Amino acid sequence: MTEIKLPRRDFLKAAGAAGVAGAAATTGIAACSPETQTAANASAAAPDTYLVLTNEEVAFLSAAVDTIIPADALSPSGTDCGCVVFIDGQLGGAYGGGAKMYRAGPYMKGTPEQGYQLPLTPHQFFVAGIRAANAWSEKTYGKLYDRLTPAERAEALTAWEKGVAQFDGFESRLFFQRLLQITMEGFFADPIYGGNRNKASWRMLGYPGLPATYADKVEEYRDKPIVVTEPLSIADFS
């Protein structure tokens, strides 16, 4: 998996610079209902609860996101940042149900430019993908993905990314791409959606968050860089 081989600081900062602000505008987040947002934004101190993910799916996703985003000096792990809670909220909301997808068919393999072409909703896709990934893991390693060693988990992700793993129903590469995308969204999105707890990724990047206006700073910081000591999220303005 090329992303894992990159220095984590370079990869995560590059991903953040490219999409931290745009993460809040993705199909998944935009389609998330206020009720889903509220459920996903439960206190990080309390045990995580899930809307649609099963225990097996939570175990798989926890192992996968922690392989993509391991804990280190830069930030907590993907699970500690709430990425799995974020994913659950998205899959349990309108996005997961395919509310904005054209689903009347016909369905056929398209070009890369045409994007996603499967009849499955995002929730159905991840359920099928996790089941296929675990089946491949059991066939290859003799155990479920979450029970693999860290090295085996990274090796498995590499196989999925390259498309050399055989999944039932769709390409493993597509599953990897979707898994990576929604993990990055959970890591960089506004904390109101359940991920990016304590604004960890924003602090890592030095991203100021979502200030409503800088009009009150014009005189104080004229011809000087604005100093932001605490990133602001949507919840900070409510």
Image: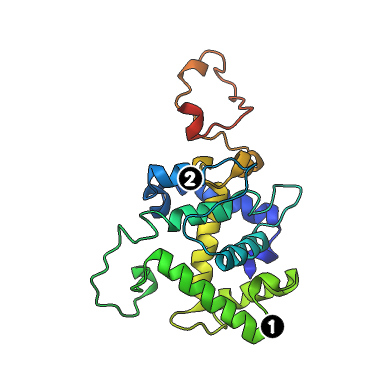
Q: Nearer the viewer, residue 238 or 223?
A: 238
Neighbor class of circle 2 (other Cα within 10 Å; few <14, some 14-19, many 20+) is some
Please tell me which residue lies in front, 173 or 122. 122
Q: Nearer the viewer, residue 220 or 38?
A: 38
Q: Residue at x 57, y 83 (%)?
A: 164
Quarter of the image where the C terminus is located:
top left
The answer to whether residue 174 shows anywhere in this view is no
Q: Position of residue 71 (x, y in %)?
A: 72, 53
Q: Relative to 196, does residue 181 appear above or below in the rendering?
A: below
Query: Can the viewer see residue 50?
Result: yes
Q: Give left or right: position of 83 versus 96.
A: right
Describe residue 74's horizontal placement relative to residue 125 as left or right: right
Q: Amino acid at mark 1?
A: Tyr
Q: At 68% across and 84% down in the image, what residue appears?
A: 142
On screen, residue 182 above or below 162: above
> Mark 2 touching mark 1, by CB under 8 A?
no
Please give the residue where the numbered disc 1 appears in the rendered image: 141
Location of residue 93 in the rendering, given as x and y in whole percent from the top left corner: 39, 54
Task: Report the disc number at residue 110.
Answer: none
The tag earlier along the polypeptide, 2 or 1, is 2
Which label lies toward us, 2 or 1?
Answer: 2
User: Residue at left 37%, top 46%?
Assistant: 33
> Which residue is drawn at the image coordinates 59% and 63% (left, top)?
61
Q: Quadrant of the N terminus?
A: bottom right
The amino acid marked with disc number 2 is Ala
Count every numbered label the image shows and give the total. 2
Count residues near mark 1 (Cα–Cα under 10 Å), then give few for <14, some for 14-19, many for 20+.
some
Please tell me which residue lies in front, 236 or 202: 236
Residue 39, labelled with which disc? 2
